[in-house]
Image (spheres, rainbow, N blue to C red):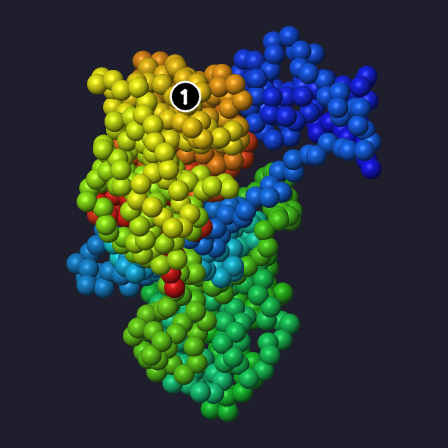
Amino acid sequence: MEAPECPVCLQSFDGESTVPRVLACGHTACEECLTNLPKKFPNTIRCPACNVLVKFPPQGPSALPKNIDLLRLFPSISQVKLEPGRNCKKAVEFVTLSWSDDFYATWKDRILVHDAVSVEIRESESSDFASSSRLCGSLRDDLKVSLLRVASFEHDDCDSVLKYSYVQRIMSCLWGMREEERDELDAIISVKQRGVSKVFGLWGDLKNGVFYLVGEKLTGFLLEEFDSLTEDDTSRLAIIGMQICEALLNLHKVGLIIGCLSVSCVKFDEFENAYVDLVELIETGRNVYQSIAEETRSLRNPVGASEMGLILVRLLQKGIFMSSEVLFELLKEQNMLIKDVSSKSWVSYNSDVWSVCFLVLKLRLGKRFTEELIESVNSVDAKGCEEGIEDLLVLYTGITEKLSLESELQGKFKSMVEILRQCCCLDPQARPVLTDLWKCIRELVMKPRFNSMSQLHKTVSGKRKEFCLARSELCRLVEVDSKELDEELPGMKTGNDAEEGKVDIDFAGRLSEGKVKYKDMRGHQDSVTGLAVGGGFLFSSSYDKTILIWSLKDFSYVHTFKGHQDKVMALIHIEGTEPVCVSGDGGGGIFVWSTTFPLKEQPLRKWYEPKDWRYTGIHALAYSEYGLVYTGSGDNTIKAWSLQDGSLVCTMSGHKSVVSTLVVVNGVLYSGSWDGTVRLWSLSDHSLLTVLGEETPGIVRSILSLAADDQTLVAAYQNGDIQIWRDDTLMKSMQIQSGAILSIAVNGKWLFTGGWDKTINVQELSGDEISVDCTHVGSIPGSSVITSLLYWEGKLFAGFADKTIKVYYCGH
């Protein structure tokens, strides 16, 4: 048998160098470790074995008794150590939240508050607001923003009495997305590059059930300004071209290939600096998917040259420039190509060179440039060119061969003819890199005199993986006004499975495995005051002076305890060889009821605390394993009574007002009072351990309810505040309700509060020994003031002032 050892240092006790000392809770630790244990409060320490607060003599551990028996009997017996959580029953979740704490921590700061955005609706959009892909709006500081629809969620979870909070509904939307979609959102929101418009985060429009990406709104092009450019406008156009190249180079640094470009993607700030608009880039990508869908809606075979020509013309009409390899990859993903794409068509950073080249030419040549490109596509003979990539490339070849760059680009622009022709090459590997195009455009403005541009050729390594925005999952979320598509685009449902012309991207229903439902229990004739569970029953007390017993199997009425002459104010159930229910009333009466069959109407025994007309009787009850019942009274004291005979064992004084709530956890009695403080009492000798809540002198907030679970203590206040302590250290203070909180319940990570505002708030606790987060999950509207709450085995019981009791549970 192994030698007994100290639970802190794990050294074996020998009576000399490692001396075993016995604490008030009965556990043993060595002298040296007890000396070094942290002492948050005077003359108290927390037992390293059971975590209970116990008295510690001011003389030090030498004043504690030595565990002589342990040394004498060694090695025949050894110290039995308390293993944390050894016999702990796993908590049953109230609702199933699919995401982890890490997932929540990753996304919570990217969600804009629900009132951050004010949506501007033009009259033409008002009739179809919810299905609009793009909207405008403004932040609370009047900063104009663009809103890009990312997903949709339920307008209201009507089938559930638990109304999920704004953040939880957005989280469920994010969790329901595919991982690829979330990765793309993460990459886009994380972009903080010069020359690229800002993306502020994600926002949900609860009224219309739409989830948006919110970006900076800048001023766009007026194309008419570029239809009559002269030689004097060369510098202006060159600066715009340079800034576009710089923005794309910065996006390449973070692994983002745009894949396509249009005039609408370029915006300007108040100083006329050009920016690339990320939100508009996604919208342009959606236009590409929409164009493909519209031109191939009735197509059952792979794309031929005729269909390819129609797609190209539609893209050019919309001012979208996309290289052949990107377009072929999109068609390949839709199984619309006969052959696999050769290695020459791989999408790379050089794919963006093609798009920038054609955009610069569009700005230089104006409207007629688009007309000439469309004419060149239409002039290609599609007959006999129906199969294979090589045949389809004829269309792109026709575009590039008919570009009369020499005649169109004169004067200063003539120096760019050669590099622009190289940028139009169908082989992406043969195109110049974007930095070469940037340098050529720069020479229209100034000649380089320094060697600092050598830095442009350096490769920037990043941890983020590369992806092409035009081929992203976010660009696939398009709307097509047709129900005749035989093959679905990814992310799109057709036929009877989707609304006409709308994408099915509703993720809110995946939040949990079921909806929160409830059942009513009626029987009391006045306000419910207390709830307790034990022996397979639910016990409820009321101002009607009775205690009703309900079955936990079907929540049906079972029995009534009668005998109180005053309003029943508090209620507890005590398990043991003789399970009993204990109740206290406003007249100071304490009644003990047997809960074994056959149930009786009269109590086993009863007694009264000393009566005084100035005080209001019993307000709270608690029980300790020492066989004592504790009462919190209107005379500002806590009294300990023997459960066996009702004799008064001890009176604890110190509170300056009514003791409204009591909790026993880990060998400590916690008492809350209308004086705004929580006092901690030792169960072994009933001495005061410490006082919580005295940190704010002069501010008195009445404590109406306490709840504790493991090392977490939560206090609820008259003004709607809660305070959370962990290991007796204040970790969080916040207001969560608009009125007084009359009752709270804690179980694991779940915190429930209810009170005067007739709403049960559901919070999720998370964090560590350094910080605690309290996240609003949702709320349950009530029919009246909530007077008592009890959480048990995944079910939430609530007592109301309108005489009813409701049990909330997760149904399917």
Q: Residue furthest bottom?
A: 384
User: From the viewer's perspective, is 515 left or right of 27?
Assistant: left
Residue type at mark 1 is Leu
The residue drawn where x is 29% and y is 22% is 634
Query: Image height check: is 589 above or below 173?
Result: above
Q: Position of residue 329 (x, y in %)?
A: 53, 72
How many C-alpha atoms fall within 10 Å of the one at disc 1: few (<14), some, or many (≥20)?
Answer: some
Query: Image height check: is 641 above or below 521?
Result: above
Q: Quadrant of the C terminus?
A: bottom left
User: From the viewer's perspective, is 46 left or right of 110?
Assistant: right
Q: Position of residue 569 (x, y in %)?
A: 28, 33
Which one is in front, 795 or 693? 795
Residue at the spot of label 1: 648
Q: Which corner quadrant of the image does residue 298 belong to?
A: bottom left
Q: Residue furthest left?
A: 123
The answer to whether residue 528 shows anywhere in this view is yes
Badge 1 element: strand
Q: Which corner quadrant of the image does residue 344 belong to?
A: bottom right
Q: Residue furthest top?
A: 59
The residue drawn where x is 42% and y is 58% is 512
Which one is in front, 58 or 299? 58
Q: Which corner quadrant of the image does residue 34 belong to?
A: top right
Q: Position of residue 364 (x, y in %)?
A: 40, 59
Q: Position of residue 796 (x, y in %)?
A: 37, 48
Which one is in front, 504 or 94? 94
The residue drawn where x is 44% and y is 18% is 650
